[in-house]
């Protein structure tokens, strides 16, 4: 998976999990940074959303994500963490990957708990 695809997947994970078309009201927070210098570059993104859906099921939801991508003379990589709840079930997931002169490493962790309706949090 290339670095740009990795970043897009991490940033879209939260909004896609909640089906943005069904949102009636929401509070959200977002922050991102990008910097580059003679020794490399880094991009970070953090966000959170909480609200109430309008799909007839009277659910409240909340989610959080944090991601980072970096590249420099010793390698490139990135990762993300995402977690949240739809009012009945909760999820947590994280993925990371790194490649450099000494090799490459990637991994992931995920967990779900609670009653599931139509969501499949660990499908990704």
Image (cartoon, rainbow, N blue to C red):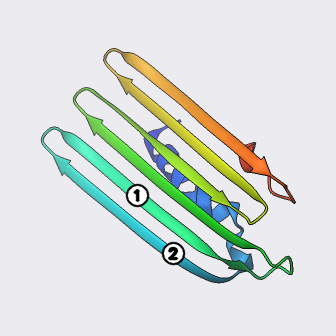
Marks 1, 2: nearer the viewer: 2
Percent of width and height locating residue 88: 79, 62
Q: Number of numbered discs present? A: 2
- Residue 117 visible within the image: yes
The mark found on residue 28 in the picture is: 2
Mark 2 nearby-residue class (10 Å; few <14, some 14–19, many ≥20) = few
Percent of width and height locating residue 81: 52, 47
The mark found on residue 123 in the picture is: none
Q: Nearer the viewer, residue 21 or 84?
A: 84
> Image quarter for residue 16?
bottom right
Q: Which residue is pictured at 74% across the width and 66% down the height?
A: 87
Q: Nearer the viewer, residue 43 or 30?
A: 30
Residue furthest toward the left? 38
Q: Which residue is pictured at 70% across the width and 66% down the height?
A: 18
Q: Which residue is mark 1?
A: 45
- Say above or below: 8 vs 20: above
Q: Is residue 73 left or right of residue 48?
A: left
* SS for dot 2: strand
Percent of width and height locating residue 122: 73, 44
Q: Is residue 37 left or right of residue 55?
A: left
Mark 1 nearby-residue class (10 Å; few <14, some 14–19, many ≥20) = some
- Say above or below: 71 vs 19: above
> Image quarter for residue 84?
bottom right
Instruction: Give the Cα separation between the discs numbered 1 and 2.
Output: 14 Å
* SS for dot 1: strand
Percent of width and height locating residue 40: 21, 40
- Say above or below: 17 vs 2: below
Q: Earlier in the sequence, mark 1 or mark 2?
A: 2
Q: Quadrant of the C terminus?
A: top right
- Residue 124 visible within the image: no
């Amino acid at each position: 998976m290339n670095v740009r695809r990795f970043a897009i997947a991490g940033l879209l994970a939260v909004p896609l999990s909640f089906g943005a078309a069904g949102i009636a009201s929401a509070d959200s927070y977002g922050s991102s940074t990008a910097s580059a210098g003679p020794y490399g570059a880094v991009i970070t993104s953090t966000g959170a959303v909480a609200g109430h859906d309008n799909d007839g099921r009277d659910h409240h939801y909340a989610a959080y994500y944090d991601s980072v991508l970096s590249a420099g003379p010793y390698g490139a990589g990135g990762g993300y963490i995402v977690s949240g709840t739809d009012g009945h079930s909760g999820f947590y997931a994280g993925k990371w990957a790194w490649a450099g002169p000494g090799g490459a490493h990637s991994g992931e962790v995920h967990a779900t708990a609670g009653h599931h309706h139509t969501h499949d949090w660990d499908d990704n």
